[in-house]
Amino acid sequence: MSTFLRTHQLLVEPGWHIQTSQRPGIVYELYDLWADPAEVHNVAEKYPEVVHNLQKACAGWQRENSIV
């Protein structure tokens, strides 16, 4: 489990689900849960500002909860 926490990030905010692996070369996946509840279409390239905001939120949550 600790390996998962170090190599993956997952965040679900109202209407959005973002996930990634922190390994080099792995890109973010972003899903619009209202328009695509089955999470079929990765819209990360279409909404880079949402990816950026959720990245910051995830990093803040990790800091606040002492998760490295």
Image (spheres, helix red, strand yellow):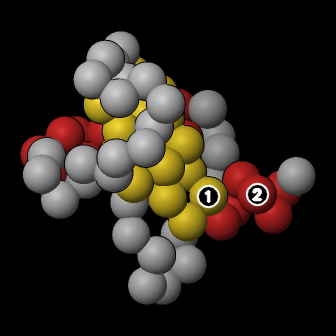
Q: Residue furthest right?
A: 1
Is 57 left, or right, of 23 in this rendering?
left
- The residue type indicated by label 1 comes to His
Is 58 left, or right, of 54 in this rendering?
right
Which label was assigned to residue 57?
none
Q: Is residue 22 above or below residue 13?
A: below
Residue 21 seen in this snapshot: yes
Where is residue 10 drawn, in percent x and y? 54, 43
Q: Residue 33's image quarter?
A: top left
Secondary structure of the residue carrying numbered label 2? helix
Q: Is residue 64 above or below residue 53?
A: above
- The residue type indicated by label 2 comes to Phe
Q: Residue at x 33, y 51 (%)?
A: 42
> How many callouts does the rendering have?
2
Q: Residue at x 39, y 54 (%)?
A: 29
Where is residue 2 drawn, in percent x and y? 84, 56
List the residue tagged with mark 1: 8
Quick one: label 1, few (<14), some, or many (20+) residues within 10 Å? few
Where is residue 17 drawn, in percent x and y? 42, 34
Q: Quadrant of the C terminus?
A: bottom right
Quick one: label 2, few (<14), some, or many (20+) residues within 10 Å? few
Relative to the observer, which residue lies in front, 2 or 49? Answer: 49
Secondary structure of the residue carrying numbered label 1? strand
Where is residue 15 drawn, in percent x and y? 32, 19
Is 53 left, or right, of 60 in this rendering?
left
List the residue tagged with mark 2: 4
Residue 16 seen in this snapshot: no
Structural distance between the alpha carbons of marks 2 and 1: 6 Å
Q: Is residue 63 above or below residue 4?
A: above
Q: Residue at x 43, y 84 (%)?
A: 25
Q: Are marks 2 and 1 in contact (CB under 8 Å)?
A: yes
